[in-house]
Image: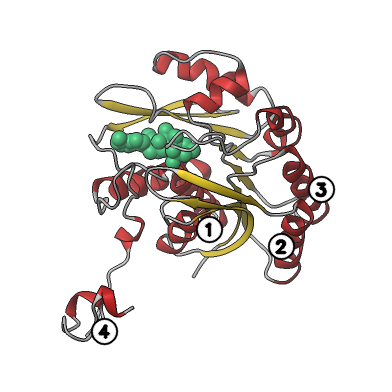
Amino acid sequence: MRGRVLIIAGSDSGGGAGIQGDIKTVTALGGYAATAITALTAQNTETVADVMAVPPAFIARQIDVVLTDIGADCIKTGMLATAEVIDAMCDVLAAKARSIPIVVDPVMVAKSGARLLDPDAVATLKRRLVRIATVLTPNLPEAETLSGMTVRDSEDMRDVAAALLAAGPKAVLLKGGHLAGDVVHDVLATEDGIELFTSPRIETVHTHGTGCALASAIATGLAQNLPLRDAVERARAYVHEAIRLAPKLGHGHGPIEHGHTIRPSGPESVGSRPADTTTASDD
Ligand SMILES: Nc1ncnc2c1ncn2[C@@H]1O[C@H](COP(=O)(O)OP(=O)(O)OP(=O)(O)O)[C@@H](O)[C@H]1O
Ligand SMILES: [Mg+2]
């Protein structure tokens, strides 16, 4: 194990995104994942059926207690739900984690269309969290909301990434998964300039949790002392392979294969168990 990542995000009961996707990603890349859970969602590949909020003071308590004992080499934030949560989290981070890099995934809407951040929390997100981010990782709709600009192509992506960089984060990785075309573009903006990453688009509906995985993979890289560009490159390659190998679960936007870096071995591996001793209905 190398690199401690504290994930501050919501639980996805379907296991594809949120805390569950984040823990799998950090583990698959050799890091250690600790968590502060901001909300519970009753969720599958088709819908977010229900959300149960965690009181902001308890979210802050989880962060405080983990940092006091275990510590963290990088922090990753995902679903934050409300302005009160952002405020409580930023207060404890200011007190305990000033020098720890922070990857902010400004999650607003799930792939199924459900709102994961109150519209009136966007101003608080910009004022308190975007400014202190080491890396901000918006998708296109989030970048449009945060910047007030419109994105139609990869040229627009450069402009929006530059505009968001001017709002205070050290770097912006603008994700282009939502733009149509045979190629997906992600734009990295830092003080050194703007770089466009491209890869072939995989034709699939199984992209639930791609954004969470990308941000957690970048956070793991930073926790392992990779330079930002290398962390981004490895994260993109990890997510691309995870989309390619998606297990095709559920009837909606299915999860990706987070575990593709892990090779089960030995007689106890699931695939080699006799069928009559372990079946799904036994559990
Ligand atoms: N169909 C695809 N083929 C290849 N790469 C993809 C595809 N869809 C997304 N990606 C890549 O996955 C990463 C996440 O991008 P995306 O725009 O899907 O984020 P997101 O909207 O935040 O995801 P989520 O819905 O999980 O929050 C980016 O690096 C993007 O380029
Ligand atoms: Mg996202």
Quadrant occupied by the C terminus: bottom left
Is any part of residue 60 visible from this angle? yes
Residue type indicated by callout 1 = Gln
In the displayed structure, would residue 37 be above or below residue 228? below
Question: Which residue is at 69% across, 65% downward?
Answer: 71
Neighbourhood count class around disc 2 (C-alpha, 10 Å): few under 14, some 14–19, many 20 upward: some
- Decide: few, some or many residues near mark 3? Use Cα within 10 Å; few <14, some 14-19, many ≥20: some
Q: Nearer the viewer, residue 47 or 93?
A: 47
Q: What amino acid does circle 3 point to?
A: Asp
Q: What mark, if any, has residue 132 been given in the picture?
A: none
| Residue 226 visible in the shown view | no
How far across and down, in percent of the image, does residue 109 sit?
52, 34
In the rendered structure, are the residues bearing label 1 and label 2 in contact, judged by CB atoms less than 8 Å apart?
Answer: no
* Residue 62 numbered mark, or none: 2
Residue 96 in which image quadrant: bottom right
Query: Which comes before the other along the chain, label 3 or label 2?
Result: 2
Determine which residue is flagged by label 4.
Answer: 268
Q: Quadrant of residue 247?
A: bottom left
Q: Which mark is residue 224?
A: 1
Please report whichever mark, 1 or 3, sits nearer to the chain's N-terminal start: 3
Q: Quadrant of ligand 1?
A: top left
Q: Nearer the viewer, mark 1 or mark 3?
A: 3
Give the left or right position of residue 279, taking residue 47 as reference.
left
Asked if 31 appears above or below 176 in the picture, the reply is below
Q: CA distance from mark 1 to mark 3?
A: 26 Å
Q: Are marks 2 and 4 in contact (CB under 8 Å)?
A: no
Indicate the secondary structure of the residue bearing disc 2: helix
Q: CA distance from mark 1 to mark 4?
A: 31 Å
- Report the disc number at residue 91: 3
